[in-house]
Image: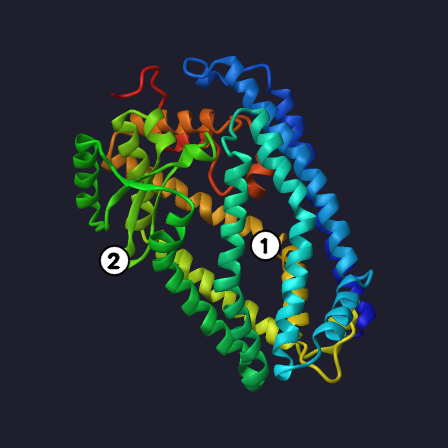
Amino acid sequence: MPAQNWTLVFAAALVASLLVRAWLAARQARHVLGHRDAVPAQFRATVDLAAHRKAADYTLAKIRFGQAQMVVAAIVLLGWTLFGGLDALNERVREAIGLRWNGLAYEVALVAAFVAIGGLLELPFGLYSTFGLEARFGFNRMTWRLWLVDALKGLLLSIVIGVPLLALVLWIMAASGPLWWLWAWSAWTVFNLIALILVPTVIAPLFNRFEPLADASLEARIRALMARAGFATKGLFVMDGSRRSAHANAYFTGFGAARRVVFFDTLLARLAPAEVEAVLAHELGHFKLGHIARRILAMFAASLALFAAFGWLASQVWFYVGLGVRPSLDAPDGALALLLLVMIAPVFGFFVAPLFAGLSRRHEFEADAWAAAQADGGALASALLKLHEDNATTLTPDPVYARFYYSHPPAVERLAALGLSLPANPTP
């Protein structure tokens, strides 16, 4: 493909994605604003107007913030690619580092410099999201000290884990011949499998405290549910999510002996025991129905296809030139190819995202149905609504926007699929 044609393809995909994003955001904003002053009929017995308006205002604020992020991200992307930013950075790093260690030091330094600059460019948005937007609506509980500690821990983990993994992938790219992408994918897959064990047992405790569930009656109730599901776990834990946010959640994580069930302390403080059981039943439904295994296999299959495409693109001169980068004649180009792929993948991936969102919504419906059969369906309905209210999730999303982005169905659709009307008084 001529480099000019590839430039046009990339530019067209970027413009199309921006236009679709803006159109969807405008639809969502109009729909939410148009329903701001009236609670949907099926929720009027349980949702007050003030909470409904807060959810609408929070949604609209996130849309405005997201639009600003989108514009800046597009400018930064063009700056890195067609306007020559990555090419200039590559030249500066080559001059500073040279080609010692067969170029590996130079490649690692290039990626590190790119990540550092990108992190600085994104920093204002992250700070505003936490200390501006989330704080304005009463969700942020993060202190500046805790934010700084988290940032330093994240940086240390990136150095200890990320740099060796990056060096391994770049070494494989340079040393493994035409099928390097297959070996690189294998290394990435092994790393992700190891992460399933290390994240819940080693990494997550670096950021949060995990205490054993202290409520004996709730533990007995949950263990009975897990026995019916055939789910074995290392333990039931409560996470101090309230240190950072007022949002609530529950999840299970890990693999094999590292598998554990985790409740946010904010969730236990908000939900009745029957509701906690119903929420966990939903999560266990994903396990029992094979959703987790299928998602992991699908992720590995998709990543294999992506690595194969990457292996081909990395050998094409037009891939670099068309994106504003001059490939090296006397140095490896693995880092350049990797950075370009990371930058353009979201542009082209945007158009297939609705397929994965639709599959995720189908899984959510199936898990809801399984949970309603194993636990109290009415408690599940009331828990879903409480979580929507506590997280200020709008009850009136635009249907097209929801079909495109939502990984979880809107509350109205979930309750309709369950065939339940919401109880005014949750099951105790």
Q: CB atoms at circles 2 and 1 under 8 Å apart?
A: no
- Which labelled disc corresponds to residue 69? none
Query: How many labels sit on residues?
Result: 2
- Which labelled disc corresponds to residue 352? 1
Q: Residues within 10 Å of mark 1 (few under 14, many from 20)?
A: few
Q: Residue at x 70, y 33 (%)?
A: 26
Is any atom of residue 241 visible in this view?
yes
Q: Residue at x 41, y 56 (%)?
A: 295
Residue 83 position, x and y percent, is 82, 60
**Which amino acid does the dot numbered 1 rest on?**
Val
Provide the residue designation for mark 2. Answer: 257
Residue 397, placed above or below residue 116: above
Q: Nearer the viewer, residue 279 or 45?
A: 279
Residue 428 position, x and y percent, is 25, 21
Residue 188, placed above or below residue 265: below
Residue 346, placed above or below residue 29: below
